[in-house]
Image (tube, grey):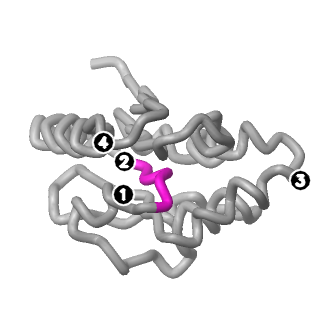
Amino acid sequence: MPKLDRVIAIANQKGGVAKTTTAINLAASLAMAGQRILVVDLDPQANLTSGLGKKGQLPDAGSVYEALTGNHDDPLAFVLQTSFDHLALLPSDRDLTGAEIELVSFEDREQRLRKLLDGLRPRFDYIFVDTPPSLGLLTLN
């Protein structure tokens, strides 16, 4: 079977339209089918992180906020395993609320997530990105 490594963003500027629910259900279903899945919680509300039972739990390297605003050699250091086999999480927390403002001054600010995920793509068959309910810089990434 050929390597898929697909990145799928679930985005809508309106809140409450089941973006997070869709991300969790798609990711869990594919993981149960044996696919290697990464879900990225790009919403400062961190509902995806909470929905996967990881609220308040961060890798030593930090959350997606630190991953986007820092320069790091190992993107895998930001990934947590979930209780599902084959399903990993790049978690969020409320620190991500400041990222939109901080990223404005960064060079290639709209490419930060792509660069981060490029280092993770070989390890996963699918990457799902749960975006915030806005059309801001995080969603643009």
* In-image side of 136 versus 21 (left or right): right
The tag earlier along the polypeptide, 4 or 3, is 4
The tag earlier along the polypeptide, 3 or 2, is 2
The tag earlier along the polypeptide, 1 or 2, is 2
For the residues labelled 1 and 2, say whether their Cβ atoms are less than 8 Å apart.
yes
The verdict on residue 139 being magenta is no
Up/down of 84 relative to 78, above or below: above
How would you rate the neighbour count of disc 4 (Cα within 10 Å): few for under 14, some for 14-19, many for 20 or more?
few
User: 125 or 49: nearer the eye?
Assistant: 49
How would you rate the neighbour count of disc 1 (Cα within 10 Å): few for under 14, some for 14-19, many for 20 or more?
many
User: 34 or 102: nearer the eye?
Assistant: 102
Q: Which residue is mark 2?
A: 39
Instruction: Please state which amino acid type lies under the numbered disc 1.
Output: Leu
The tag earlier along the polypeptide, 1 or 3, is 1
Q: CA distance from mark 2 to mark 4?
A: 19 Å
Q: Which residues are magenta?
A: 39-44
Q: Which residue is mark 1?
A: 89
Q: On the rendered image, what quadrant is the N terminus found in?
A: top left
Q: CA distance from mark 3 to mark 2?
A: 27 Å
Q: Which residue is mark 4?
A: 16
